[in-house]
Image: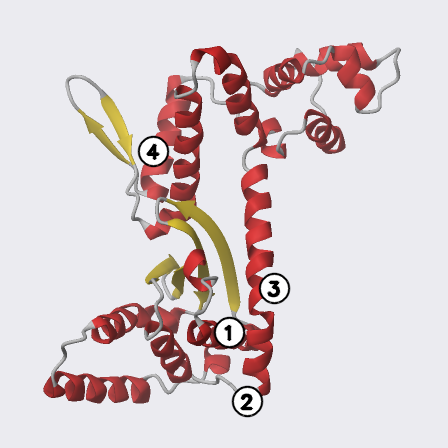
Amino acid sequence: MKLGEKIRRLRVMAGLTQKELGKKIGFSAATADSRMRKYESCQMAPKEDIRTKLAEVLDVDMSALSDIDIQTYEDVMHVLFLLEEEFGMKIERTTEKTSLVFDNNANTASILNGYLYIWDAQKRKYEQSIDEVKDEAEDQYKRWKARFPKDIQSYCSDQLYKLSQFYAPFVQAAQESGCTISTVSDFIVQIRELCQCPLTIESETKLYKPGDGALVLTFLLSELLAPEQAETHKRFGEYLYMLSVMESFGMLIDKDLFTTECGTQISYTLHMSTLMALKSIIRDIQRFEKQADSNDWDKEMFEMDYEDTLRQFNISIAENI
């Protein structure tokens, strides 16, 4: 769909005439309708500042006024090829239908899967609405799509602020206690203490190019904010403080929030290739900590391996970033 058609559809959805929309974004009464007519017929392309005003007046996300223009079946196919290569999408075909499938548990596409989950929820809400309010529900569904991902980003910002405010005193306490980190071994010790808390922790890796990768740790927001979990709050506060120390060394750490069937999750992507090796170590620690029936032999063997791991990863973080 061309940009002009997008503007026209959004204008109609907002219940505005060309002249009304033109005046709202700052054109004079004499030129408002002609300028909007040229935009909608693609005789002129609005500049960036005009697009920003259009998005504000129409109350949509800027991405709804993007230049993405898929016109041919070949265009569609190349988009699908990209989804296969970048996000692991698979094609499944039977005699009755062709389906495009994403793995809901693929952490490499966690944000996309979160978007798909929310889209599915919005679509179901529209489809399950009763006939008497079907038109209203359809308008709300179209409005949600036009505002995407504006509402989601607003929700994520609110949740990140809530988490930051909640953990601020615990991070401060960690700093005042002398909690510190200098080696990868220190980080492993901290992660083990988190694994001893009632937390769901997922560990994955992300490879950008040979020799350049990251460790991704994901947590459930509801567990991090659960009341009466003093030890969890203390340990996660120490974890957040250690992240801030690693950032001071120059490590790039990305935070992402996304929602799936499991709930709202937050992931921390730690850009340091050496940390990629911790994925299997963290999973081994989780398995051990969750085994309530471990015998003395198993415990002793694990602790010996754990001490060897700490010696192996007695590596300066600052020097390896």
Cα distance in 3D space between marks 1 and 2? 13 Å
Residue carrying label 3 = 165
SS for callout 2: loop
Residue 237: give its label: 1
Residue carrying label 4 = 81
SS for callout 1: helix
Cα distance in 3D space between marks 4 and 3? 42 Å
Q: Nearer the viewer, mark 2 or mark 4?
A: 2
SS for callout 3: helix
Q: Bin the neighbour count of mark 3 within 10 Å (Cα to Cα): few under 14, some 14-19, many 20 and up.
A: few
Q: In the rendered structure, which disc, 3 or 2, sits on the residue that comes first in sequence?
A: 3
Q: Amino acid at mark 2?
A: Gly
User: Picture quarter containing residue 6?
Assistant: top right
| 59 relative to 197, above or below | above
Q: Given contact means CB atoms under 8 Å apart, are the residues at marks 1 and 4 in contact?
A: no
Residue 272 seen by the camera? yes
Residue carrying label 2 = 178
Q: Amino acid at mark 3?
A: Gln
Cα distance in 3D space between marks 2 and 4? 51 Å
Q: Nearer the viewer, residue 271 or 210?
A: 271
Q: Nearer the viewer, mark 4 or mark 3?
A: 3
Look at 55% across and 68% down and name the residue there: 167
Q: Nearer the viewer, residue 284 or 215?
A: 284
Q: From the viewer's perspective, is 49 left or right of 239?
A: right
Q: In the rendered structure, which disc, 3 or 1, sits on the residue that comes first in sequence?
A: 3
Look at 16% across and 22% down and name the residue there: 94
Q: Nearer the viewer, residue 294 or 106?
A: 294
Cα distance in 3D space between marks 1 and 4? 42 Å
Q: Given contact means CB atoms under 8 Å apart, are the residues at marks 1 and 2 in contact?
A: no
User: Picture quarter containing residue 35?
Assistant: top right
